[in-house]
Structures are given as C-alpha cells and as structure tokens.
Amino acid sequence: MTQSTTALIDLHTHTTASDGSCRPAEVVAAAKAAGLAAVAITDHDTTAGLDEALAAGRELGLEVIPGVEISVNGGPTGSMHVLGLFVDHHRPDFAQAMERLQEARAQRNPQIAQKLQEMGVAVTMDMVRAHAGGGLVGRAHFAQALVELGAVANRQEAFGRYLARGKPAYVEKYRLECDQAMALLRAAGGVPVLAHPGLLKQPPTALEALLRQLASMGLEGLEAHYSEHDELLTKRLQAMAGKLGLIVTGGSDFHGAAKPDIRLGTGLGLLRTPASLLEPLRRRRDRIRALAAQ
C-alpha cells in the first residue's frame, strides 16, 4: 500500500500502558480523527497496549504499527532511547525480555518513593499506582502524585527538583546495552530507530560518530522528525541519515495530558512526518525478517 506524500503519520506515541494518559484504543481513535495515515504505539519498555491498539486499528481502518521504546545504556548522557517499529511482540523471547524490564522498573519504584518520604514528601506507592491507571508505573506518575500533594506546581518542577537524573529522588534503573537492544528488536522482526537524537545535544561530528557505532550494532533508522527538532536540525539529521544509510522516521512523542503541549501528529504545532517514509521503513522490516529467516 502506497500512501500519498501529503498524508501524515506519527511513529512515536505513548498510552496508559506506560506513561501516557490515553488508552491505546483512544490514541488510535485520535489518530484516525486527526486524519493520520498510520500511527505507531511505542510505550516505554512494554508492549502491553499493542493488542488493544491493533484491534482498534482494524475496527477503524487505520494502520497501527506495533512498537516499543527501550532505554539503553550508552551515549553522551549515559542513556538513550531506541524505538523498535513493527515488532512481533508475541515472540516468547521478546515478551520475556519486556517482562524483565518491567520487573526492573517495579523494583526501582519503591526506592524512589522511599527517597521522597525521607525528604518529607508524603507520597505512597498507592497514590502513584492510582495515577498509572493499571499501567506500568514510571517517574511521570510520581510527578503527577507530587503535583496532587501540592509538593510541586507541575510535572516540570517535579522532575527538576526531585526526579531527574542527578536529583535527590532519582534512582538508576536497569537498562539493556545498545547491542543487546538492537539484537532483541531485530530478532522480533522490528526496525531499530534512535529516538529524538536532537535531545542528545551533540555536535554533528560527535553525533555522526555515535550513529556509525550504533549502525554497526544494527541500528536502521533515525527519528529526524520530532516535536522538539526545529527545521534546521531536521534537515541536518535527514542529511546525516542519508550519508550513513539510515532510514528517516518521525513522531510526536505524544503522551496526552502528561505532555499537554504535544499533539498527536503535529507535536508542538510544526511537526510534519510524511507517510512517504512508511515504504522505506517496510523495506527495512522485510529485509530484517528475511535475514532472520536464513
């Protein structure tokens, strides 16, 4: 199926399965209402929302791309995010790896709560779980609980004062190594893509060196179109991807009410990810699966 170059897609969204505020079916319905040609569900370290999203896509006649966003060790800040697009989330080895990542998050969360309590912030895990709505608990839900308690004014202050790396309630979490994540995603038939490379805030030469290293591990794509990338950065990333033989993708990083300024498909208002990028993405998917079948 070939999409019109005027149609738009969003290949980076989050649901209540991780730290978004909308259920998977609601994200799909919103994507349909927005006129998008396709949407990918890419929750953090979990694929729990994919079956619901795929079912909604079939019902509404919208292409839903099963995905995930995995935190990995490495990069200039010590960690990076890798998207896996078109993953076969029912593969037993892949599902087991996601379970291990979720268990690591579950072990981290009480430690964050304890640190906050030791600082006099009366947060409890029950309060945090209530904000997760039955989904995977993460720092975003702690931020919501802190706002509810009146300990901070908003999510940004919660991270800035307590929850961000280097702040007093931050707890390091288990992450896969880059090569492990690439191998895991590729074994599940997925296309590994570096998420929001502009947030790494690296000069072009350093970023290119990093991308070459990641490509040697199995990286296939670069999220050049992103809510916080301006036009100049997007063009630079597109050129870099072309130079290195990587495909280009794009997405809003939609979280619903958790990031109210970011809209599905259009991000902060200027994001435009053309549906013409789907065909190269599918070709990479098919090549990865053909190699795996050999």
Image (spheres, helix red, strand yellow):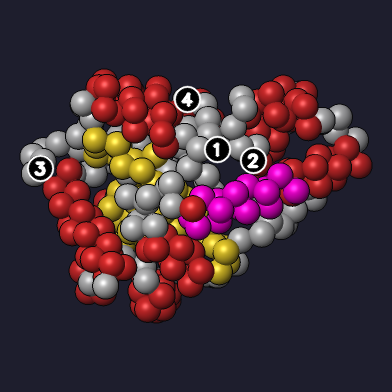
The answer to whether mark 2 and mark 4 are in CB contact below 8 A is no
Per the image, the residue denoted by label 2 is: 138
Q: Amino acid at mark 1?
A: Ser
Of callouts 3 and 2, which one flags the residue occurring earlier in the amino acid sequence? 3
Residue pictured at 66% horizontal, 59% vertical: 174
User: Quick one: SS at disc 2?
Assistant: loop
Q: Nearer the viewer, mark 3 or mark 4?
A: 3
Per the image, the residue denoted by label 3 is: 1
Per the image, the residue denoted by label 1 is: 18
Of callouts 2 and 1, which one flags the residue occurring earlier in the amino acid sequence? 1
Q: Amino acid at mark 3?
A: Met
Of the pair 204 and 141, the residue shown nearer to us: 141
Q: Amino acid at mark 2?
A: Gly
Residue pictured at 56% horizontal, 53% vertical: 96
- The secondary structure that dominates the magenta segment is helix
The answer to whether mark 3 and mark 1 are in CB contact below 8 A is no
Q: Amino acid at mark 4?
A: Cys
Q: Position of residue 155 (x, y in %)?
A: 63, 34
Residue pictured at 34% horizontal, 33% vertical: 54
- Cα distance, mark 3 to mark 1? 30 Å
Can I make out residue 273 in this image?
yes
Q: Position of residue 206 (x, y in %)?
A: 42, 76
